[in-house]
Image (cartoon, coloured by chain):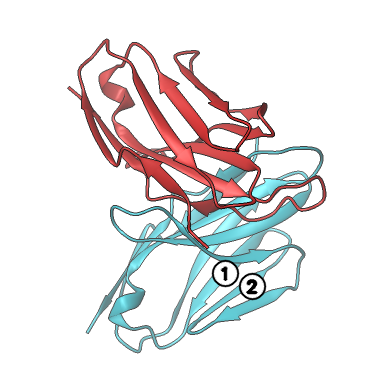
Chain colours: A red, B cyan
Amino acid sequence: KAGVTQTPRYLIKTRGQQVTLSCSPISGHRSVSWYQQTPGQGLQFLFEYFSETQRNKGNFPGRFSGRQFSNSRSEMNVSTLELGDSALYLCASSPAGTSSYNEQFFGPGTRLTVL
Amino acid sequence: EDQVTQSPEALRLQEGESSSLNCSYTVSGLRGLFWYRQDPGKGPEFLFTLYSAGEEKEKERLKATLTKKESFLHITAPKPEDSATYLCAVRRSGGYQKVTFGTGTKLQVIP
């Protein structure tokens, strides 16, 4: 079974630009979560989608948004990039049906550098 | 607010020197506690899920245990390839709850 894939793997942007990251979950997984990982803060939860609906949202500004498509693939968008947005962005998928809310499987991440 | 605290922040062991990593958590109703391993530049790799106090799970040289306030990841006779950052996370029970991660323990095993 193929794992979680994320594209692109590396991205360099300048302040003020916007960026879109993509995540394809493990086949059959319907939940996709996004995390931001920085050396100082560790993994910070951004949001979770299940069946195209946002189920949870972390404490990030509105510049961070996401969506999920009918095939469970997900995208996240960051508008008006700031230097502090430089981080590893991780996507995780889970079967997460109504009664199986269990472990998540992570992709390799997208390394975003904002100059 | 759920909280996860991991200690120590970093640990250096000689090959074969067993030790334990600690994960203390505060959550009102635990649905699951998770352990992950993360290698540099990669996404976390799932290791274990523990659901209730007293539960134990093992995988090769790793054994995870759970009490009502903390979890331990015991590493027996570690090898250099066990070097990684080990992350602990919790999910609260009740509805659709997010997962809260600790900041991890960076383990280095010296040959």
What's the amino acid at mark 1?
A: Phe
Structural crowding at the residue carrying mark 2, measured as other residues with C-alpha within 10 Å and reported as few (<14), some (14–19) or many (≥20): many
Q: Position of residue A72 (x, y in %)?
A: 60, 38
Q: Secondary structure at mark 2?
A: strand
> Could you tell me if the residues under marks 1 and 2 are in contact, i.e. CB atoms within 8 Å?
yes
Residue at (27, 13) in percent of width and height: A17
- Which residue is identified by label 1? B72
Give me the residue at 27% from left, 10% from top: A16
* Viewer-closest of A8 and B86: A8
Query: Nearest the camera: A72 or B81?
Result: A72
Q: For the image shown, how many numbered marks are present on the structure?
A: 2
Residue drawn 57% across the image and 47% down it: A93
* Residue B26 visible (yes or no): no
Chain ID of residue with mark 2: B
User: What residue do we see at 65% from left, 57% from top?
Assistant: B33
Residue B34 picture quarter: bottom right
Question: Mark 2 = which residue?
Answer: B65
Q: Is residue A74 left or right of residue B57?
A: left
